[in-house]
Structure formats: structure tokens, C-alpha cells
Image: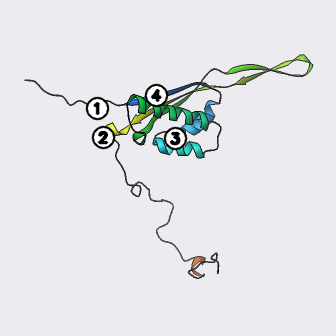
Amino acid sequence: MITKEKTKKSVLEVYAFGHHIPMSPDKARRIIDQIRGRSYEETLMILELMSYRACYPIFKLVYSAASNASYNMSSKETHLIISKAEVNASTSTKKLKPRARGRSYPVKKSTCHISIVMKDISFDDEYREVDSLKSVKKVRWKKKHTTIGYHNMYSSEGIWDKK
């Protein structure tokens, strides 16, 4: 008797690595934590609008990973999410800064390794389209029963409306 096993769809992941990027790993982690788990399009928008110097190399890596996915797996960019993103410390560049009286002062510039893994969710049953209104959580800090305040004293137009 021959039994058939269910074959699980292979997880399609694409990698992009950046080695010896001249920035502090802590500064790069600050941005990587913001984009981890987000879609490709949302990630590009976040990286363009954030005003940190570390955004540009990460932007280039995300863009490179997406182009790898479209070339190697022929997947659409709308189906890509960032499944893993890591920042690790690398070797530090050591230089000497000249000082007074012929002395020198050592300067250490830190570098980091950044790795980004993108996943195509069109092959995965785990991810589905979710209505944006359902995903919004209720605010916990609002009270259920409000007391009468000063906001009822003014007209319905409000005090800041122009006449």
C-alpha cells in the first residue's frame, strides 16, 4: 500500500548582505527594528521619510533584496515582506589623528554587517489580506464613562472655528 504525504510548499526567501558598512551597529539597529516584519512598499516609504544617515545603506540593501527576488524567483514586489533583519558588529577601522607636539591620538570608526531576508507571501498560506479597520486595536486608556467637562460650555462650532 502506497501512502501519499502532504508536501509542504517550500519557503522562498531571498537574502541581501551588506558587509563593513561604516556606521555604528546601534544606530543601524534603531532603523532595522522599525522595518522588521513590514511589507516591501511600506519599508521603502518608511526609509525615505526617516531622517537618519543609516537609512540610505539599509534602503539600498532592501532594494537589492527585492531585485534579487524579482530576478531569481520572478516574484512581484507587492508580495514581499521582510522576514528577518539583523545587524552585527564588524571590525573597527583604526586611524591616527595628529595632535599637538608631534603626538597622535587613535580614532576607532565602527562598522557593521547588515543582513536582510525577504519572503514571498504569495506562496505562503500563513499570511492573508486583513481589513485595515479590523486590525486597529481599541484604545485602552479611554474611560467608558466620561464626566461633564468644560467642552459643553461652548457652541457646537467650537472656539477655534473662524467666523
Disc on the earlier residue, 4 or 2: 4
Residue of label 3? 35
Residue at 36 percent of width and 49 percent of height: 129
Disc on the earlier residue, 2 or 3: 3
| SS state under label 2 | loop
Residue at 38 percent of width and 35 percent of height: 75
Residue at 41 percent of width and 55 percent of height: 132
Residue of label 4? 15
Question: In this rendering, would 108 be left or right of 83?
Answer: right
Label 4, residues with CA under 10 Å away: few <14, some 14-19, many ≥20? some
Q: How many marks?
A: 4
| SS state under label 3 | helix
Q: Are marks 2 and 1 in contact (CB under 8 Å)?
A: yes
For marks 4 and 1, give the CA distance.
19 Å
> What label does residue 9 carry, if any?
1
Looking at numbered disc 1 in the image, what kind of residue is underneath it? Lys
Residue 131: horizontal and vertical position, in percent?
Answer: 38, 54
Q: Considering the image in quadrants, where does the C terminus appear?
A: bottom right
Residue 131 to residue 143: above or below: above
| SS state under label 4 | strand
Question: In this rendering, would 48 be left or right of 13?
Answer: right
Label 2, residues with CA under 10 Å away: few <14, some 14-19, many ≥20? few
User: How was this image coloured?
Assistant: rainbow
